Each structure stands twice: as C-alpha cells, then as structure tokens.
Image: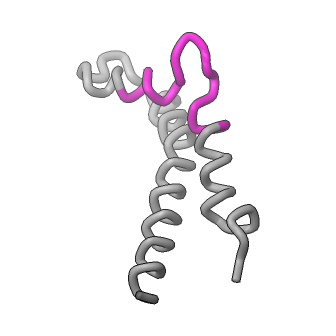
Amino acid sequence: MKTFFKSNLFTALILSFTLGLAPFTPEPHLFGKIRWIVGGGIGMKGMDLFDLFFHGAPWIWFAYCLSTDLFRFEKKQ
C-alpha cells in the first residue's frame, strides 16, 4: 500500500498549491484569469488561454486523483 507522501494525490496537491496558484500576490493568477473570463473575456488572447490551461491543469489532475482515490476507498468498503 502506498503511503500518502508517495501517492499521486500528494504530488497533485503540491503542484496545485505551487504552480496552480502562482504568483501568490496580489492574487493568484488563476483566479484573475477566471474572473476575466466570467467578466466576458474582452481582450483575451491565445496566450491568456494557454496560461489559464497551464495554471488550471494541476487542479484538474488533483480533482482526478482525489476522485479515483475516493472511488477506490468506497469500492473496498
């Protein structure tokens, strides 16, 4: 059995909090991009969408790892 620190979930969590939220000040970059899209995305270029994808990818991977671990945990019980 894997320990938590050797699991994909731990790696995804670390990547989500470091790469997914960088830069940390004045606000996480991902939140600014999401706010921009919700506001209509006026002036958004291809580079901004590329940036949104790469800041959001660790969070998508984290959600995937969390759901597969929870599914495995429910299946055992």
Q: Percent from the top left, x then y, of residue 63?
A: 46, 57
Q: Is residue 66 left or right of residue 19?
A: left
- Tell me which corner region of the image, top left, top right, bottom left or bottom right, holds residue 74: bottom left
Q: Residue at the location (63% across, 22% down)?
A: 23
User: Residue placed farthest to the bottom in the image?
Assistant: 76
Judge whether 6 appears above or below 32 on screen: below
Q: Quadrant of the C terminus?
A: bottom left
Q: Is residue 27 left or right of residue 19?
A: left
- Residue 31 highlighted magenta (yes or no): yes
Q: Percent from the top left, x then y, of residue 62?
A: 53, 56
Q: Residue at the location (47% across, 73% down)?
A: 68
User: Residue placed farthest to the top in the image?
Assistant: 26
**Which stretch is magenta?**
18-34
Q: Percent from the top left, x then y, of residue 75?
A: 41, 87
Judge whether 68 appears above or below 33 on screen: below
Q: Quadrant of the N terminus?
A: bottom right
Q: Residue at the location (44% across, 21% down)?
A: 32
Q: What's the colour scheme? A: one colour
Judge whether 36 appears above or below 54 on screen: above
- Tell me which corner region of the image, top left, top right, bottom left or bottom right, holds residue 18: top right
User: Residue placed farthest to the right in the image?
Assistant: 6
Q: Percent from the top left, x then y, of residue 46?
A: 46, 32
